[in-house]
Image (cartoon, coloured by chain):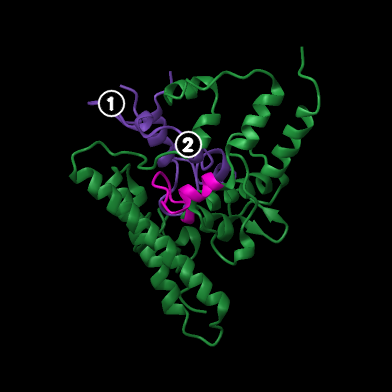
Amino acid sequence: MRGRRGCCRAGAARSPPGGEEAYGARCEVPDLPAALQEARPPLQCAEAAAAAAQGSLDAFLAAGDDATAGTAQELARQDLRAVLDSTLSHLEHVRSSLSSGAAAQPCQLQPPPSLTRSLGPQMRASAALATEPESDGAASRLHALSSAVPGKAQQATKDAAPRMYNALALQLWILVACQTELGLRDKPGKSPDYYHTCYCLSGLSSSQHAAGRALGLPSNTLAAADPRLNVTYDRLHAAAAYFDSHPPLP
Amino acid sequence: MLDLPRLAAWAAQRQSVLEGGFNGRTNKLADGCYSFWQGALFPLLRALPLDALTPQQGASLSLVWA
């Protein structure tokens, strides 16, 4: 394998601050990519992300001409292509919202109606859906939750790419940087633990269902969890059924 | 009341351009667990009507409170 590590391609190499002798001869550290050197407005941010994604794909393609090419290689190429496409789509979105003179709108999507309906009274009021009758008791609230976000609602948002963050780039980070054979971890160099395993997987599930696709093999797809409770829907339905079968608390 | 447009802008800027992971605050490295603590905020924000996330005329999305 050659050229698979993209981290040093991001900026020109330079000597470390302490001089070469401080780290041993020939040791080089990369410059911080320009993208990270200062706070950037959305356009520069999006351009940097697109350039980074393009660089990753280029590096992969340059290294992918060996005999190991196969299904896994092809899937990885498709995934990198998808990450690039999503960054380019985001860049286009930022450009168009800037050129239209509007303040950058974080989201262009209409919410799935059933999800809006199930939010608490305060949010429901702001969603101008306050005409729905109030319901009391844990059982009915749980029931409302469990029936609120069916597969249909997810299907409705599936076609539209999420605009507020890059879900595919997040998946790539979790799979590549956080995954170990013993669990998931904070970042490379750290040890895996149950806490990070739980929330890396929770985040992976969330981003898969927000993006409408999972990076990697189809078997990577995790169960969807309710975004408010981080509880899978089968458990939520089970809880609703349990409380429905009991009288409401006084 | 929450300043939802500003919350959305802040949350979006928690995603690292280079790594794709999220951090918890400015100038911190990405941490896998924020994939949920920050990343799962977006499905909640998306559940709101669009105008709840649209800045008012002349409002700032700056992360510095002025």
How far across and down, in percent of the image, does residue B36 sit?
Answer: 57, 42
Q: Which chain carries label 1?
A: B
- Location of the N terminus of chain B by quadrant is top left
Q: Residue shown at 55%/45% (left/top)?
A: B35
Please indicate, yes or no, whether residue A195 appears anywhere in the rendered image: no
Left or right placement of residue A28 versus residue A178 in this view: left
Q: Residue shown at 73%/41% (left/top)?
A: A235
Mark 1 → mark 2, Cα distance in angstroms: 23 Å
Identify the element where label 2 is drawn: helix
The three-letter amino acid code for the residue at tag 1 is Gln
- Chain with colour green in the figure: A
How far across and down, in percent of the image, does residue A141 sit?
Answer: 65, 25
Q: In which quarter of the image is residue A233?
A: top right
- Chain with colour purple in the figure: B
- Residue behind mark 2: A113
Q: Which range of residues does the magenta coloring cover?
A: A152-168
- Residue behind mark 1: B56
Q: In this view, does A18 lie above or below A124?
A: below
How far across and down, in percent of the image, does residue A118 sit?
Answer: 55, 30
Q: Do the residues labelled 1 and 2 touch (CB within 8 Å)?
A: no
